Image (tube, rainbow, N blue to C red):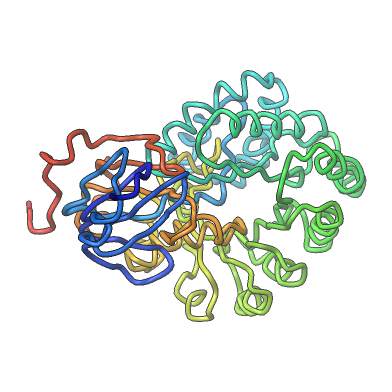
Amino acid sequence: MNQSIDLLIENVGRLLPGHAKPVEGVSVAVDAGKIKALGPAGDLAGLFDGRQSFDGSGSLLTPGFVDSHTHLVFGGNRAGEFVHRCQGRDYEQIAAEGGGIRASVKMTREASLDQLVEDARPRLARMIAAGSTTIEIKSGYGLDAATELKMLRAIRQLAEEHPIEIVATFMGAHEVPDEWQHDRAEYVRIICEEMIPQVAEDGLAEFCDVFCERGVFDPAESTRILQAGLEHGLKPKIHADELAASGGSLVAGEIGAVSADHLMQITPDGIDALRSASVVATLLPGTTFYLRKSGYAPARPLIDAGLDLAIATDRNPGSCTIESMLFIAGLSVMHLGLTPGEALRAATYGGAMALDREKVCGSIEEGKRADLILWNAPDEDVLIHEFANEVPRTVFAAGRVVSDSQGDRTERSGVHPDQGV
């Protein structure tokens, strides 16, 4: 008698494991939220009966996306800034005039906890439907203890409501608020001696992040903040070398950050620093695209240096509203020079590494959480070619269907690369 399991995905046309080379003609058995077995289709069919079964014929199976960098919780919107940028104004100019992060700070301070949660829910639902099964969310639009804690509590409530995994990051060092522009040192002290201890005591975040950038936090301030986080059990991440070669990558190497993110202006010394400390390089091409910048992060030199690469949406209220990790993967192929396989690895296993979760998710391996996407596409080339479209998919989080746009899989037809225009 075959063993009864929760889920069997049969006869998968092509499986992209995330951490290894693609394989074809396999089935995947899932039980109790984890991958129980994978192997040749005929072999597993003779071993397991799934309480729920899916036909994977002609389909691509990938890990669920791991979106390792977002600012999903915030008050209000900054749509007007986008229009102004499209009319020729620069992001830095808008920020200097009170827009940018500080505009979101004002609106987030004014929003209640319930309002922050309510506003974030539809964004989160769209990201899950697009295939993200692990999502990091940062604070950073409060810049005072009360609002930063309010944001982190909103993130925790969202995590409790949704079947995917949500990872919280404290980012009180996102900007220097208006009330402390005259005394930056005091604001840094408040972050280190008041905010971080309270966040850690309440167990509201796993990571501590800082925006190391010209006009924001310099390398010395960034190091102090991240060190304070480490002393209270918060693992370090850093926004580094986005708008200028700010030294953020050097800080990441010195402190042993889990990831350094953006890296549009990283220097060869910065690459060496990341490599020496095994820091994951997280690239955010959606932000470069959305801000209409010309210089994308140097993905190929980072790969050639032996660095592990992640990509993420950077979903936020001002500099990137892209919510689809598939769209980010497509941008990575177009503008970062990645192959489709490299892009999907960076969106799954690389993202898991950037969140210190590569032993739990990000790849299709026995014993890992069954976060999966079954795509109506025969392979990764076709999937990336269709990155701007809503490719039909079934999304599983811990073996449970959380989104399905495919209908009856036995009657559907796939998208094929020879269907020219």
Residue drawn at 68 percent across, 57 percent down: 237
Image quadrant in which you'd find residue 137: top right
Residue drawn at 57 percent across, 49 percent down: 69
Q: Nearer the viewer, residue 337 or 17?
A: 17
Q: Nearer the viewer, residue 416 or 267?
A: 416
Q: Is residue 137 above or below residue 111?
A: below
In the image: residue 221, left or right of residue 336: right
Residue drawn at 66 percent across, 43 percent down: 168
Q: Position of residue 238 (x, y in %)?
A: 68, 57
Q: Nearer the viewer, residue 8 or 100?
A: 8
Q: Position of residue 89 (x, y in %)?
A: 52, 42
Q: Is residue 397 above or below residue 296?
A: above
In the image: residue 269, left or right of residue 228: left
Q: Is residue 356 above or below residue 199?
A: below
Residue drawn at 63 percent across, 69 percent down: 279
Furthest-front residue in this view: 1
